[in-house]
Image (spheres, grey):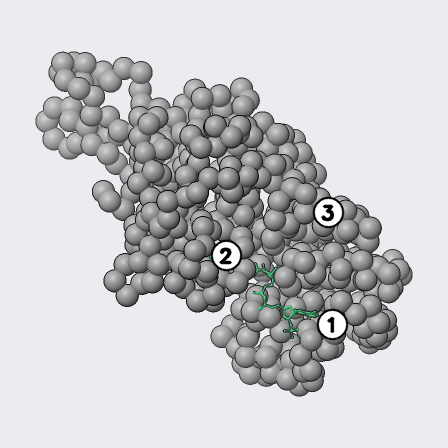
Amino acid sequence: MATATRALFMLFGATGDLAKRKLYPSIFNLYKKGYVDNDHFALIGTGRREWSDDTFRDVIVESVSANADSEEQAKSFASHFYYMAHDVTNPEHYDALSDYANKLDQQYDTNGNRIFYISMAPNFFGTVAQNLKAHNCLSDNGGFNRLIIEKPFGRDYDSAEELNNALGKSFNEDQVYRIDHYLGKEMVQNVLALRFGNPLVEGIWNNEYIDNIQVTLAEKLGVEERAGYYDGSGALRDMVQNHTIQMLTILAMEDPISFKDVDIRREKIRALKSMRVYTEDEVRKNFVRGQYGANGDQLDYRHEDNVPTDSITETYVAGKVLFENKRWKNVPFYIRTGKMLSDKFTRIDVVFKKPLIDVFAAAKGSESELNNNVLTLFVDPVNKIILRLNGKKAGQGMEMQPIELTHTQSDEEKAVTPEPYERLIHDAILGNATNFASWDEVSRAWEFADVIRQVWDKDQPDFPNYTPGSMGPDAADELLERDGRAWVFNSKK
Ligand SMILES: NC(=O)C1=CN([C@@H]2O[C@H](COP(=O)(O)OP(=O)(O)OC[C@H]3O[C@@H](n4cnc5c(N)ncnc54)[C@H](OP(=O)(O)O)[C@@H]3O)[C@@H](O)[C@H]2O)C=CC1
Ligand SMILES: O=C1O[C@H](COP(=O)(O)O)[C@@H](O)[C@H](O)[C@H]1O
C-alpha cells in the first residue's frame, strides 16, 4: 500500500515548458498511485501570465489527459491546482503567496508540509529562495520545507558557489534537492543494484578485470527551440558536468555501508575526489569537442534558429576520464555526448580484459580470435542488459564465437517503471535525497569541467567538424585509437 504524503506544492515556472511536459504528468502519476494524499494536497502555480485558476486547470487537464483513466479523473486532479500571477523579482508578491499558502494549508490540512519547485531560468533560483524565506513562505508549524531546483546549477564553479550560498541563506543543504533527471532513470539506478547486489559483478568491478568503461549519451535531435539557452551553455555544461559525471560516479564509487542517502553520497563524493582534474595540456590531449555541420535538408548548427552564425558552442563532447584510486588505476572511462548523432540512446559499455593466454589459439598456433567480454547497460530508449561472452561454435572442433546473454525489461516491468521526474519528485516527497546531486558533488564536477571550458575558451575550434547522423568528429574515434581501443558502439561499423 502506498504511503500518502500530505503536502502543499509551490511551483515557480508553472506556465513553462518543463512543467507542462514533465512535471504535471509526473505529479498526476503520483496522485493516481496514491503517493500524494488525494484529499490533502494542493499546488500553487506561478508565472507572470495573468491566468485564472480555470485556465491553469485546463492546462493541467490537457497535460495529463494522455495518462488519465477518464476526463473526470483529470479534472478532479486539476481541482487541487491554484494559480497566482507573480513576478518572482517583486518582493511584495511573496506576501500574497504566503497568505495564500497558509489558507490552502488549512483548507487541505497538509500538516504544514511544503515543497517548493523552481522550474525557471537559473538566474532566478537564488532570488526565489531568498524571498521565500524573507516573506515567511516557509512553513513553521512542524511540517517539512523542501526545495527542488532545476538544472543548470550554475555555469561554472564560482557561479554555482554563489548560487549555493544564496540558497543556503534560506534552506539547509538537507532541504535542497538538485534535480539531475538521469539519476531517476531506471537503468542508472540498476547500476547500483547490479554492482552491490551481485558479488559476481562487484568481484570483477576493478582494474584487474575491466579494461575500460564507455558512457554514451547520444541525441538524434539538434537544439530544437532551446538554442537561446543552449548556445550559452554547450554540451560540456548541458550534459557532461551533470548527467555524464553523475553516471560515471555511480560506476566508479566504492560500496556504501548502507543504501541511505548519506552513505551513498559519501561514496560518490569520494569517487569524485579521485577523479583527475586535468592540466591544460591534458585537456587538449584527452578531450574533444565538436559542432554539427549541414547534411541535406539539415541545417548546420550555426544556421539553426537563434544561433549566431559565428557560434563556437560545442554540440558534442568526447573525453577520457581517470579515477586515480586503487580500484581504477589505468582504467580509462571514455565519455561522449552530442546532438544530431546517429540515434537517440544512452548506454554504458563495460569492456573487460581478454584472457592473458588464449589457450584455443595457442593450441592451433594461430592469432587469438577472442573478443573482449562486454557488459552493455542500455539506459534509453529501452532498458536492456547484454553480456557479450566468447562461446563455442556448435560442431566439431573448438571454434569460438561471440555469444550474448540478454535481459530486456518486460512490458509489465515497463508499465510500473516511473518516469525520471515522477520518481524524483516522489523521492523528494519522502525526503530521500539519494538520487539528487549534493553540493559537494556538483562543486567537484564544476572543478573538473571548468578546466576544460577554460582551455576551450582560449583555443579557436575548427567547426563544424561532424556530420548530422554520424557519431561525432573523427577526433573522438582517434581518442580511443591512440590507446589501442575503439568505441563499442560505432555507427560506421
Ligand atoms: N524544458 C526542458 O526540456 C528542460 C528544462 N530544464 C530546466 O527547467 C527550467 C525551466 O525550463 P522551461 O520550462 O523549459 O522554461 P520556460 O521558458 O518554458 O518557462 C519559464 C517559466 O518561468 C516563468 N517566468 C519567467 N520569468 C518570470 C518572472 N520574472 N516571474 C515569474 N515567473 C517567470 C515563465 O512564466 P511566464 O512566462 O508566465 O512569466 C515560465 O513559467 C530551467 O531551469 C531549465 O533549464 C531542464 C531540463 C529540460
Ligand atoms: O538535461 C538535458 O537532457 C536532455 C536529454 O535528456 P533525455 O532524458 O531525453 O536523454 C537534453 O536534450 C537537454 O539538452 C539537456 O538540457
Residue 131: mark: none
Q: Does the residue labelled 3 lie within 8 Å of ligand 1?
A: no
- Residue behind mark 3: 162
Marks 2 and 3, the one that precedes in the sequence: 3
Do the residues bearing badges 2 and 3 touch, measured as CB atoms within 8 Å? no
Where is residue 386, by image quadrant?
top left
Foreground pick, 53 / 336: 336
Q: How far apart are marks 2 and 3 (CA)?
A: 22 Å
Q: Nearer the viewer, mark 2 or mark 3?
A: 2
- Please, what is the three-letter code of the amino acid marked with disc 1? Asp
Give the crowd class for mark 1: few <14, some 14-19, many >=20 residues within 10 Å: some
Q: How far apart are marks 1 and 2 (CA)?
A: 26 Å
* Label at residue 87: 1
Measured along the vertical axis of the image, is residue 164 above or below residue 422? above
Which residue does the numbered mark 2 point to in the structure image?
231
Q: Looking at the image, which residue is at 54% across and 48% down?
A: 237
Q: Which of marks 1 and 2 is in front?
A: 2
- Sequence order check, earlier mark of 3 and 1: 1
Q: Earlier in the sequence, mark 1 or mark 2?
A: 1
